[in-house]
Amino acid sequence: MDLSTRRIAARRPFGGAPDRAAAQDALTGITLSHIVLPLENPLSDAKVLTGRQSPLSAVDILACEAVSENGHRGMGFAYTLRAGGSGMFALACEVADRILSHDPNDIGRLWERLRWQTNSLGQGGMSYQTIGAFDTALWDMKARAAGLPLAKLLGAHHDSMRIYNSQGQYLQASVDEMKAAADRSIGLGIGGIKMKVGQPDGQEDLKRIQAMRDHLPDHIAFMVDANQQWDRAYALQFGRIVDEMGLAFIEEPLDALDFEGHADLARNLATPIATGEMLTSPTEAIQLAQQAACDVSQVDALRIGGVTPFLKAMAMAEAHRIQIAPHWLMELHVHLAAAFPEAPWIEHFHWLEPLFDERLDIADGRVAVPTRPGLGLTLSSKARDWTVASQDIGEGGRP
């Protein structure tokens, strides 16, 4: 047969083909907001002590409020620390109209459409974090339209999960301040305490760990977080010293992308190794699991692009028998982790609480999965006050 007469199978184009026959609804408006949420006190971890970063004094939030032709609403958000908030807002304003008039139920299709619109920026990073705000709003809308909490829409395995606190044990805190903060957390019903390590003087780290270990009740889990500050040899040495202390995990002992090094630590230490919070694409999250680079995956849904890619990363963790303890964002991750079969950890931070009118229920070391439809969140009046820029696309999505 002549090449010119051979038939080529028709292929659907990437990034969301313009096939609208099954459309049941349409996005008519989106409101985007850049919110700068101030923290009560600047915070320092090992990256600050080594001069790599400045103390954290605020969190930049990209909020996305969407409305559909049928009157359904959804609210999602993304975030960045120290830099990039204005860039994420500008990018979101630039691409938002690419999903207007499309069916909001086709979340996977719209995620791909936005991915291809931002492809020149790379597959990950700021582009995916910006997409995460749209994606989360669409999942919120879908669950609200169904009258279900997002956890139930995804297929929840849990009505409550273990929760640990990461907020009061930063490196700028004294031992007495860490103990007091831990006592307050335990008083709130939190079941685990995580402290920062990674100081230039490792002996100081060990003294602080021992002081906290001695202070905490036996039923309270205890974790440490090095924020990527060690090399492989030091991490192995440190891990062997603390292996007898019964830590729930050691977090980010190495560079976030050193999958091989983390895998070696996981094989050679009794203490579980946790990492994954700094990954910025579903590809990296999948590699983390495939390379057995941790015992506990801390992949952050909004850093890898939202709920849609997180579900893929979570399925990969399940397939490789890896536990999960998603990074930060308890208001979102409480829904997503509920759909994981094994017992996850949820990370407690109250930083984002002022953004929303609602609060999570915490007691007896566990956090309850909200029963309100969708994420069960509404932006507060404080969030409106902290808004430094906003843009309506289409008819706007603000109530």
Image (cartoon, grey):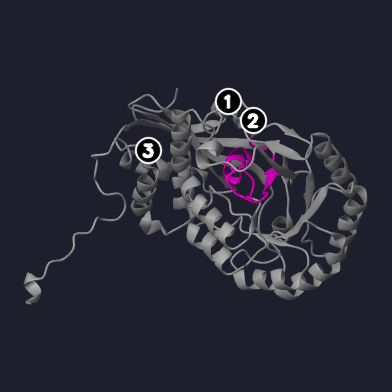
Q: Nearer the viewer, mark 1 or mark 3?
A: 3
Please state which amino acid type lies under the numbered disc 3.
Answer: Asn
Indicate the quadrant containing the C terminus: top left, top right, bottom left or bottom right: top left
Please state which amino acid type lies under the numbered disc 2.
Answer: Pro
> Residue drawn 61% across and 55% down?
277
Quadrant position of residue 361: top right
**Left or right placement of residue 133 versus residue 224 in this view:** left
Q: Secondary structure at mark 3?
A: loop
Report the number of numbered marks: 3
Q: Are marks 3 and 2 in contact (CB under 8 Å)?
A: no
Q: Which mark is residue 380?
A: 1
Indicate the quadrant containing the N terminus: top left, top right, bottom left or bottom right: bottom left
Q: Secondary structure at mark 2?
A: helix
Q: Determine which residue is flagged by label 2.
A: 354
Q: Along the line of sight, which residue is nearer the eye, 335 or 88?
A: 335
What segment is highlighted magenta in the picture? 326-352
Q: Are marks 1 and 2 in contact (CB under 8 Å)?
A: yes
Please state which amino acid type lies under the numbered disc 1.
Answer: Ser
Q: Secondary structure at mark 1?
A: loop
Residue 121 in view of the camera: yes
Position of 343 relative to 284 (above/below): above
Badge 1, how many Cα within 10 Å: few under 14, some, many 20+? some
Kindly report the distance in space between the C-alpha atoms of the residues bearing marks 1 and 2: 7 Å
Kindly report the distance in space between the C-alpha atoms of the residues bearing marks 3 and 2: 30 Å
> Residue drawn 67% across and 52% down?
54
**Left or right placement of residue 52 versus residue 20 in this view:** right
Badge 3, how many Cα within 10 Å: few under 14, some, many 20+? some
Q: Determine which residue is flagged by label 3.
A: 105
